[in-house]
Amino acid sequence: MQRLVLILFLLGSLFGFSQTNDTVLTLEEYLGYVKKYHPIVKQAQLITTESEIKLLKSRGAFDPKLEVDYNRKKFKETEYYDKLNAAFKIPTWYGIELKANYENNDGTYLNPEYTTPEDGLYSAGISIALAKDLFINKRMATLKQAKLFTMQAQANQQLVINDILYNAVTTYFDWLKNYQSKLVYEDYLVNAETRLSNVKKTFFAGDKPAIDTLEASINLKSRLLDLEKAKIGYVKSTLELSNYLWLENNLPLELEETISPDITTIDKIDLIFNSSLLNSTEDLIANHPKLQEFQIKKKILTIDKRLMVNNLLPKIDLQYNFLTTNYNNISSFNTANYKSGLNISFPLFLRKERADLKLAKLKLQDIDFDISATKVSLKNKIESLFQEIESYATQYNILLDLVKDYKQLVNSEERMFTLGEGSLFLVNYREVKLIESQLKSIDTEYQLFISKSNLLRVLNTL
């Protein structure tokens, strides 16, 4: 698969990434590319296209029809019969069908009932279902359900795209978390290198014991090991992020090493996520695509139930056709010349029909249970996530203060060590606690981002 590299100096002009710093890929810019170019997002848009095609197919049941039936038999120079029957039918919304017909039959052994005048016989009439299939039939039900399926497909499309964006957002946050962890270890690696260099100088000057150089060296190697582990996590998350970056014509993008996430995302997250929408969560729940999908499914099942009730009725079909030999003269169509028919049928026990109706009612009860359970589940999830977000926000602020205090403590310990009043072991110990608190703050920030993303995923507003 062809892969492209995002070149640093082309980002601003070609790809529209951050204009203030070309090496920074912000969450907003990243989401813009995912929404516009990701193949799975485009694929999700086919859901509604497919349903629209099915709707067009169901409308075909109401298309006018032209039918021609021609039969001829000739044997030993005798024409047994020559029959032509051409009809034009127009189905209507209810159980009514309009029909125009032309017959021209001839032959030695033609059945007398098929006999027509020399120029043929024209007829125009109507076919009506007087009981079953009058107000609803399979054709009408299919079209109504196809319209509802289109609406259902739109709701389903929103759910699919929402899940894709959630996965993309959490991937960005994982990339940001690993990047910040890498920065922490890079900073403290520089500290470890500087400290080892200073300890060596003081050792050669006779101010520090040799054990301090060994401890400083061990600390440096430990920082190197931590940094390598952080680099692996960062590289993996970068490659994972690249899965969501595409251009037109399904061209994938590969991030260059110089491109980094926006470390100020915490200050912009509510604006990017448009968190003001969260003030109307009740409306969002009521209009949630999952609930809409269930409501539409209920309407579809209601149509099925009406169709099952319709099947309990007797089938009574009436046909009436005016006959004439002169189709140019409309007045020639009168009640004196006609062809009519009546067809009646009715199952005695209706076991199949009654069973179908009971099944349709059971399905409606089942969907009602789904709707009730989904409403309660959404409400509880939202309340839980609100509390989770509040807790992570509190933890994050506490950890920021903790990091600030640890930095002061490490600086004080280093000054004491420089003045010969402290120990390198204590400096390293304080610094380890500082690193732990910084990593905890990064992880808590990540968890805060994930909780907010999860809330928007549940509300389907991503």
Image: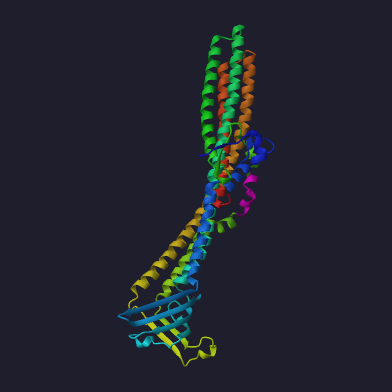
Residue 279 counted in the magenta span: yes
Q: Is residue 437 visible?
A: no
Up/down of 254 relative to 185, above or below: below
Q: Is residue 416 visible?
A: yes
Q: Residue shown at 60%/40% (left/top)? A: 393
Residue sitting at the far bottom: 336
In the rendered image of this protein, does residue 266 appear above or below residue 199?
Answer: below
Tell me where residue 201 sits by quadrant: top right
**Residue 434 % position (x, y):** 58, 27
Specify the principal SS of the magenta part.
helix
Measuring from the top left, give residue 238's x and y in whole percent.
54, 35
The residue lying furthest to the right in this view is: 20
Residue 384 place in picture, x, y as percent: 53, 48
- Colour theme: rainbow
Residue at point 57%, 16% (across, down): 424
Q: Is residue 234 above or below residue 363?
A: above
Give the residue at x 61% y 23%: 410
Q: Is residue 50 above or below residue 6?
A: below
Foreground pick, 355 / 252: 252
Magenta residues (range):
270-280
Q: Out of 131 and 460, give the one closest to the viewer.
A: 131
Q: How many marks?
A: 0
x and y, in percent, of residue 162 in the image: 54, 50
Q: Residue furthest front?
A: 77
169 vs 276, nearest the viewer: 169
Q: Residue at 54% across / 16% down in the picture? A: 217
